Image (cartoon, helix red, strand yellow):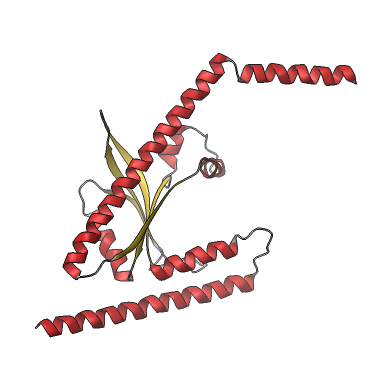
Amino acid sequence: MKNSVLEDKVRERKLLDALFDDEMMSWSKGILERYNRLMAYYRCAIMEVETKFNVLNEEFSLRYDRNPISGIKSRLKKLDSIKEKLERRDLPLTLDTIEEHIHDVAGVRVICSFVDDVYLLADALLKQDDITLLEKKDYIANPKPNGYRSLHLIVTVPIFLEHEKRIMQVEIQLRTIAMDFWASLEHQLRYKKDFDFTEEMAKELQDCADLSAQLDARMDSLREHVESENTYDVE
């Protein structure tokens, strides 16, 4: 028994020595540096997209006398989420695979005041000659079965480095304040730990999503009325 334990410890020590020898450490350090560099590129792409929306918000505030953007949020997908997504697709965890197959590593969420603003901003962004649309999913016109609504765009945007230009992918979500409120709370409720989410609760959330859509429609109607009155007063 003692010999077995001793042998296990020897094998464990040899494995640790193999993992942490100079060659392995150098290889691991190189992979980590390349990964961090890639994530830095994605962060730069996020900044580029955020800047574009901030410029559009400023322009539209002058044209329409109001700001169509209520807020902008961004996130960089975590490594464990990237790994899980690649495993679901039976793809290897490599940097090339991440760039080629994971389109939402960099994410920007734009919170708009009204539904019309979502499409106004999306159209204005896609008209810019350095933005290329790869994929569009309109969950406002066609909500998901659970009631989720948002406009999703996968685009490429160039980032300019010291000696090169790189084309990076960014996922953009555009939604109203009401859509964002519903989506945030739905996620908290549905994925709460150690709790069974029932069909009745799912139905209740769908009803809340319908109420959220009705609220957006009524707010849009009020905005149109106010803007038409202002136009009439000017004339």
Task: Give the farthest residue toward the left.
Answer: 235
Instruction: Residue 66: tell me if it is visible.
Output: yes
**Image-based side of 195 in relation to 177, left or right:** right
Q: Is residue 143 visible?
A: no
Query: Looking at the image, which is closer to me, 214 or 40?
Result: 40
Q: Is residue 171 above or below residue 4?
A: below
- Is residue 64 shown left or right of residue 9? left
Quadrant containing the C terminus is bottom left
Q: Is residue 168 above or below residue 63?
A: above
Residue depicted at x 27% and y 61% = 121
The image position of residue 231, as x and y in percent, is 15, 81
User: As drawn, which residue projects farthest toward the right?
Assistant: 1
For this view, does 218 lie left or right of residue 224?
A: right
**Image point 65% across, 69% down: which residue?**
198
Placement of the N terminus among the 4 image quadrants: top right
Query: Residue 141, position in %: x, y?
Result: 38, 68
Residue 178 drawn above or below residue 226: above
Q: Residue at x 33, y 41 (%)?
A: 44
The image quarter in which residue 113 lies: bottom left
Where does residue 168 sit, x and y in percent of width and height? 33, 41
For residue 2, side relative to residue 117 (left or right): right
Number of marks: 0
